Each structure stands twice: as C-alpha cells, then as structure tokens.
Amino acid sequence: MSHLRVCARFRPDDHGDEDIACVRAIDSECFIVKDEKKEEFEFTFDRVFYQGSEQADVYDFIALPIVKGTSYM
C-alpha cells in the first residue's frame, strides 16, 4: 500500500521581501504564515523543514525511504 506524505521546506529569502509574508515555526510539523494583511494561517504537514535544515535531513526523510523501497510509516 502506498502512502502520500506532504512536506514543506523554507529557505532564506533572497530578495529581502520580509513585508510579503512571515513564517513562524511551531514545530517539525506545523507553521504559521502571516500575510500582508496581518492575517495568520496555520498549516500542518507530515514534516516541515525550516531554514536551518540540512539537505541531508531533507533527503533522509523524503527520498531515502523511496530509494530503499521501505514504507513511509
């Protein structure tokens, strides 16, 4: 049986457009986005990778189980 996982990765803003949206980390599965109208929206994923996440962490969580042919859960 296949499983679908949804992840998000946040990287540093290259343009310095901090006024567009603000992302606030809650934990490894949730984050809050504040838009230009100052409204807050909370999102939950199977995993959230923030700016400090290493590429190896992303690979180990997302790709490695696929490469090894193991289950996600």
Image (spheres, helix red, strand yellow):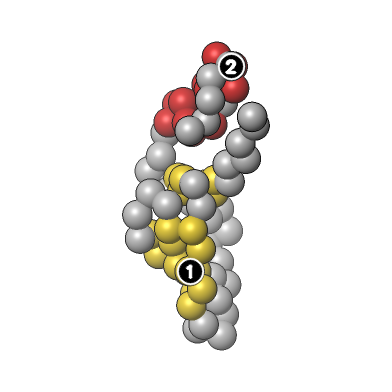
- Amino acid, disc 2: Gly
Of all residues, the one furthest to the front in this rendering is 1
In terms of secondary structure, where does tag 1 sit? strand
- Amino acid, disc 1: Glu
Residue on which the image places disc 2: 69
Which disc number belongs to residue 62?
none
Question: Which percent across, then down, holds residue 64?
Answer: 52, 21
- Left or right side of 12 for 20: right
Q: Nearer the viewer, residue 72 or 21?
A: 72
Q: In the image, what residue occupies the spot 48% across and 77% down?
A: 40
| Badge 2: residue crowd in 10 Å (few <14, some 14–19, many ≥20) | few
Residue on which the image places disc 1: 42
Q: Earlier in the sequence, mark 1 or mark 2?
A: 1
Give the vertical position of 48 relative to 33 (above or below): above
| Badge 1: residue crowd in 10 Å (few <14, some 14–19, many ≥20) | few
Question: Which percent across, then down, holds residue 20?
Answer: 57, 72
Q: In the image, what residue occupies the spot 48% across and 33% down?
A: 73
Q: In the image, what residue occupies the spot 51% across and 73% down?
A: 41
Give the vertical position of 58 relative to 64 (above or below): below
Of all residues, the one furthest to the bottom in this rendering is 37
Question: Which percent across, then down, holds residue 34?
Answer: 49, 74
Q: Nearer the viewer, mark 1 or mark 2?
A: 2
In terms of secondary structure, where does tag 2 sit? loop
Q: Nearer the viewer, residue 27 or 37?
A: 27
Q: Nearer the viewer, residue 42 or 69?
A: 69
Q: Nearer the viewer, residue 14 or 50?
A: 50
